[in-house]
Amino acid sequence: MIIIKEENTKAKREALKGYSIMVSNVDIHQIIAFRFDNIKTGTEKQIAYAKSIMNNKVYKVNEITRNMMVGGKMTVKEYEKGIESLINELDNFTDAKYIIENVK
């Protein structure tokens, strides 16, 4: 699993083609880029769909944590540890069918 934190510039985003990119909730001038490459079982179509499910999961959690941080219910450290932990946990899944059926 690769998680990259970079400055939020057009050049940096273009250099990270192939990665999923989201704006950090800590600093809008920072992006978090990640890529799920660990799925080994499934058809090409299943693997692509499983990756999109996992990306959407990370994006949804990022949105929820933004609201929690604004409301004072989450600290910066909790956010950073949580997002990294979620991405690492999702990257442990290797079966596309399992991801499709169980990751919501």
Image (tube, rainbow, N blue to C red):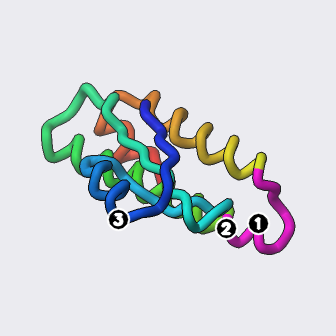
Specify the label residue 69 is tagged with.
1
Vertical comparison of 80 with 74: above or below: above
Residue at the spot 31% in from the left edge and 49% down from the top edge:
16
Magenta segment: does it hold 68?
A: yes
Q: Magenta residues, as a range?
A: 66-76
| Residue beneath disc 2 | 66
Q: Position of residue 65 (x, y in %)?
A: 68, 62
> Amino acid under label 2?
Arg
Q: How crowded is mark 3: few (under 14 residues within 10 Å), some or many (20 or more)?
A: few
Circle 3 is placed at which residue position? Answer: 10
First in sequence: mark 1 or mark 3? Answer: 3
Q: Is mark 3 on a helix, strand or loop?
A: helix
Question: At 43% across and 48% down in the image, what residue appears?
Answer: 33
Residue at 30% x, 38% y is: 97
How many C-alpha atoms fall within 10 Å of the one at disc 2: few (<14), some, or many (≥20)? some
Write the residue at 55% across / 58% down. Answer: 30
The mark tally for this picture is 3
Callout 1 secondary element: helix
Q: Work out which residue is located at the far left of the displayed protein and give it.
A: 44
Circle 1 Cα neighbour tier, 10 Å, few/some/many (<14 / 14–19 / ≥20): some
Q: Distance between the residues labelled 1 and 3?
A: 26 Å
Gap in angstroms between the C-alphas marked 1 and 2: 5 Å
